[in-house]
Amino acid sequence: MVKLTVIYNLPPGADHEEFLKWRTGPHQKHNEGTPGVIKTDFYIVEKSPDGPAPYCYMTEAYFPDMETFERAWYDPAYQAKLKEDVKRIADPVFLISREVVTAEVAKA
């Protein structure tokens, strides 16, 4: 499995509530509709183990493999939409990772 992780903030003066409305509404639907996406999550970062976190938000999108991810990511229409969406955020960091081990841990 391949995961796209994006960590980011909002630009100065941006409205948190307005952003959340967009991010959990139309943008979430767009992420869910991206070809090849099998799961997508959105998080508000609460803190880091040492105190305040350097980023406020995190998005994750899961793809079955690198080929599927790259087909979606490098699609010209996807890149055009991404270019517009990135205008709503600040300091984005995009990470692409490949799963090596996964474990479901059941607690008694």
Image: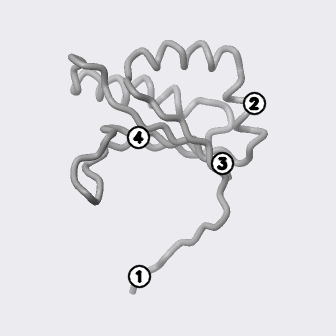
Q: Which mark is residue 2?
A: 3
Q: CA distance from mark 1 to mark 3?
A: 27 Å
Three-letter code for the amino acid on which mark 4 is drawn? Met
Q: Earlier in the sequence, mark 3 or mark 4?
A: 3
Q: Residue at x 75, y 30 (%)?
A: 71
Left or right of residue 99, residue 71 in this image: right
Farthest right residue in view? 67
Left or right of residue 33, residue 55 in this image: left
Q: Vertical placement of 95 versus 50: above or below?
A: above
Measured from the top left, where is residue 37 in percent x and y?
62, 39
Left or right of residue 78, residue 54 in this image: left
Crowd around label 1: few <14 · some 14–19 · many ≥20 (10 Å): few
Q: CA distance from mark 3 to mark 2?
A: 13 Å
Q: Which residue is mark 1?
A: 107
In this rendering, the label closer to the viewer, 4 or 1: 4
Contact between labelled residues 1 and 2, with CB atoms less than 8 Å apart: no
Q: Residue at x 23, y 47 (%)?
A: 52
Q: Earlier in the sequence, mark 3 or mark 2?
A: 3
Measured from the top left, where is residue 50 in percent x and y?
25, 57
Left or right of residue 55, residue 92 in this image: right
Three-letter code for the amino acid on which mark 2 is drawn? Arg
